[in-house]
Image (spheres, rainbow, N blue to C red):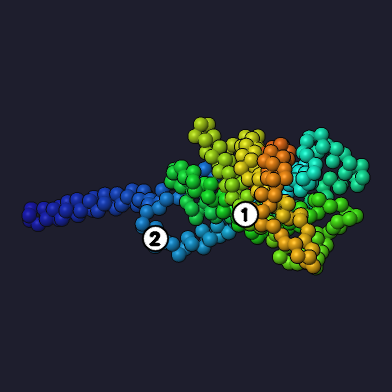
Amino acid sequence: MSRLIEKPNIAMSITTTTGSQLSSTVSASPSNNAAPTDDTAPATEDEDGHRIRTTTSTEGSHNQSTNPAKLHNNLDEVIISLISGAAAGALAKTTIAPLDRTKINFQIRKDVPFSFQGSLNYLRQTYVKEGVLALWRGNSATMARIVPYAAIQFTSHEQWRRILQVDQNGANTKGRRFVAGSLAGITSQSLTYPLDLARARMAVTDRYTGYRTLRQVFAKIWVEEGPRTLFRGYWATVLGVIPYAGTSFFTYETLKREYHEIVGNTKPNALVSLAFGAAAGAAGQTASYPLDIVRRRMQTMRINPASLDRCPTILETLIKIYREEGIKNGFYKGLSMNWIKGPIAVGISFSTYDLIKAWLRELSHLKRGRVDK
């Protein structure tokens, strides 16, 4: 009987021991599940403020679900760049429009030497004869050109930076930085060149003897000079925009990078951005100014289709300017005016672009309900 009584005790002890092991196993499993291994690295930001997330190969199975989100984010970035660039270009060019018109008039006239006193006299005479709005004559053509031009330039610069992998993974790719800026300038200039020619024509004429509207510029050129005239000076412009845009973007991006390495702040304030943009504008204008003279001469030259005269080439224009006006009074005529208006325009353009882009990104994040902090 004693043995019969002891068996249930043995069974109960076995059951108790096994149950305790099972309970301990079950209680341990939630602790393992509560901290699953995360294959996703923490998000970081590059020097332009873009969100970067590094992942391992285990995330490859989720590519189909993440691709639409990536495409949507890329589309948002393109739209933000277009809007920011258009606003930045419009504000910058409107600010320096009177100085720009003055510079163009001196550039195309070989009989009048440039001076600050002469520039002030030109502005005063224009104001007396035609009124204050005449100082912004041709600005409508400028806006028709600069809005798409600046939008395309800044947006294409962002895309060229990605294609050329500029300064990615901590690299310091100075050569690619210059090439990306040059390609951005070529892209925007090629798509908007006839508007640049029309702006130059309106800037050097008055409303009584020249063109009254932008549409009249295109109509008269098409009928009187032929459609090819709309692209006169294009190659001089492209050759000039390579050092101009390349040097401008290179200088601005390099100064921002050096500022980040010294100060540790990836987003300089408005005054610092304005100063960096001004330095970029001065460097870009100086590097490309002789070709700017050539393109203005070619753009504003009128050709009579009935005559045997032909439009001179870039080389012929360079030789003619050198022989008749020399280097200082020919190739660099009005450069001091550009050292005033160029840094102002480029400084406003770059700083405004960065500010508006940051603001639009913040609005975009708020709209999606995930604000980046």
Residue of label 1: 238
Q: Residues within 10 Å of mark 2 (few under 14, many from 20)?
A: few
Which quadrant is home to the C terminus? top right
Which quarter of the figure has residue 170? top left
Give the mark nearer the N terminus: 2 vs 1: 2
Residue 329 on image: x %, y %: 72, 40
Which quadrant is home to the N terminus? bottom left
Which quarter of the figure has residue 125? top right
Which quarter of the figure has residue 344? top right
Residue 303 on image: x %, y %: 77, 61
The kind of residue tagged 1 is Val
Residue 203 on image: x %, y %: 80, 51
Residue drawn at 82 percent across, 37 percent down: 118
The kind of residue tagged 2 is Gly
Apparent side of residue 193 relative to residue 62 in the rendered image (left or right): right
Residue drawn at 56 percent across, 37 percent down: 255
Helix or strand or loop: what does disc 2 sit on? helix
Residue 284 on image: x %, y %: 62, 43
Give above or below for 321 relative to 339: below
**Residue 60, labelled with which disc?**
2
- The residue nearer to you, when weighing 230 against 151, is 230
Apparent side of residue 242 relative to residue 18 in the rendered image (left or right): right
Residue 209 visible to an observer of this rendering: yes
- The residue nearer to you, when weighing 183 against 44, is 183
Measure the C-alpha gap from mark 2 to mark 1: 43 Å
Say which of marks 2 and 1 sits in front.
1
